[in-house]
Image: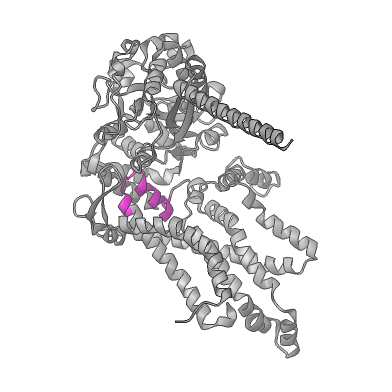
Amino acid sequence: MKAVDSAAAGSKWIKKTLAMACLGASCAGAAMATQAAGVLNLYNWGDYINPEVLERFTAETGVKVNLDTYSSNEEMLAKLQVGATGYDIVFPSVHMQDIMATLDLLEKTNINQSAGFENIDTAHLIAESDPKGEYCLPYGWGTVGIVYNKKAVPELNSWKEFFALPGQGKKIVMLDDMREDIGLALLLDGKSVNSVDPKELKAAQKFLLEQKPNVSAFTYDSIPMVQSGDIAAAQWYVGAMMYVMEDPDTLAYVIPEEGATMYQENMCVLKSAPNKANAKLFLEFFMKPEISAMNTVQQTNGSMNKAAIELLPAEIRDNPSINPSAETKEKLQIFRELGKGTKLYDRIWTKFRTAS
Amino acid sequence: MRSFTSQQKQLLLLLSPATLFLGIFFLGPLLIMAVYSFLEPGLYGGVEWNFYHWNYGRVLGWADGFYEEFDIVYLQILLRSAGLALVTVLVTLAFCYPVAFWISRMQSRWKSFCIFLIALPFFSSMIIRLYAWILILRDSGFANQILMSLGIISEPLDLMYSGTAVIIGMVYIFIPFMFLPVYSSVENLDPKLIKASQDLGATPFTTFRRVIFPMTLPGVVSGCILVFIPALGNFVVPAMLGGAKVVMIGNLVEQQFLAARNWPFGATLSMVMIVFMLLVVSVYLIRAMKNPQHS
């Protein structure tokens, strides 16, 4: 009996082990399967991609997309500089792309040879480090203009009118952003928003100091305050159109006639990317006109995909704030990297913010 | 050499995980900051491993000779932050001290309920609570609506984005930090001593000055330090309720690490702030060592 018992126990043990081994093997198989379809890790600005685009990508390719967000170019760069890895695609502004190229952080993707690149407006290949689009794919662009409450201000067309509002007892706010505010002062003075000339910057500082008592706040959280009428007008991004379309009787967004700063972000694959093939797959996926258009509709920003622009609903395609005329585009200026000049901006900004 | 008693060994064993944890995750980063504060800033953030002596001088106003003129702007910012922290300390103390006496005389179940109420804000994020204050303070907010419907004011008050809003927000955030230590020393006050003072003919004011206040002083001092230190580095309240019209030392550090991409100077400012705080705390520690019965 005892021998039988132990034999039975032995066979049980073998079965168990086999089962475990099978389980292990199938687990390994499953792991391999997910790895084949794989994952893609995006590192993007907050709320800067239509979640539907990611769902469609996963549905079509089986690649699972993880999204992590940052709130400034510098935050993203700092994180990568201290050795963060695992991200595949980042969305730097053009001047940050140039810095990242200098630091050798970007992977050459040859995306300009993929099908669909012929739709990309070459006027938007503006990164100095990547004039042909061999590295990054232009993603989205927009302006920094004025969002205003139509009940407080029936019509607003210029920065001059914007800065005159406090004199009429109406409140304005500006962005809490060094480059945007100094850039705006330079632009209104007819200078380059990338000037590192101490004289021009002193004049910009003087202009900002004159405006400071009239500006209620420096903040990014302007939309709710403009919508409620507590603030009449705010310097803000074209993304405000999202709110304007929801509430067109109250809100409006305008690119002022003096011009404005513009921004552009590109999709770049990192040299340290663990899933380079999937990353390129995503870039190619995003070049499809219907996908690009789907993103633009949700983001209410500018598109560089000529075929996608054709697909946009008229309210976006023909909207002069989102898709401005060539004449307006002439008056837009984009930020460039300042190198050591950053120190000058930092000092002017600190001095301006400290003044009471 | 004195050998450890078993009690001391036990204590050592119990304390070592916490010490190790703090040593690695608190002192380690602090050491990195200290080293960085003597290095040259990298052009795109990060550091160059060269000794760089401009950082500390810059705090005091010295220019680097290329881009800057002599200017004590950073000292001004530090002093302004200290001023705001001090006002926060004084207002929270003025509020918490009498309330602590009031609550300590309540029936015990009301007592616990009130302490629960004071600690309640810790259960939600500070940012969310500050957004609620925006809804209260803005021109069309609850405060102005109530005052206007009561007929006290006819035009909305300019509460939002003002110095008042910043003080309200700071006091609101830091009240629990002041209340809890003050309350614990008030609660431990021996009523017999007060009685004795009265029996010996002291006036209520003298009793307060000679008996009550000195005995609650340790709680007051702990409360002041607990409020002062985080208030000094707080920049969220001035940014959200004050409209970021003034720079606090906390903003400045953030600006150096991000927009200005000058990590060493950010590290230097942090070190200066730490030294400043250590000075404040050491004043308290020296006091406590001189009068051990009060600590």
Residue lying farthest to the left in this orientation: B65
Examine the rendered structure and indicate whether residue B233 appears above or below residue B205.
Answer: above
Residue B295, by quadrant, is: bottom right
Can see residue A200?
yes
Residue A275 % position (x, y): 39, 26
Examine the rendered structure and indicate whether residue A303 appears above or below residue B24.
Answer: above
Is B259 magenta? The answer is: yes
Is A90 magenta? The answer is: no
**Colour convention:** one colour
In this rendering, the count of numbered labels is 0
Residue B39 % position (x, y): 26, 55
Residue B25, by quadrant, is: bottom left
Residue B28 % position (x, y): 40, 57
Residue lying farthest to the bottom in this orientation: B200
Residue occupying the point 45% across, 15% down: A291
Q: Left or right: where does residue B235 sit relative to residue A112? A: right
Q: Nearer the viewer, residue B221 or B285?
A: B285
Q: Left or right: where does residue A300 sit relative to residue A343? A: right
Q: Overall secondary structure of the magenta stretch?
A: helix
Q: Which residues are magenta?
A: B246-265
Q: Left or right: where does residue A340 sit relative to residue A181? A: left
Residue occupying the point 60% across, 28% down: A19
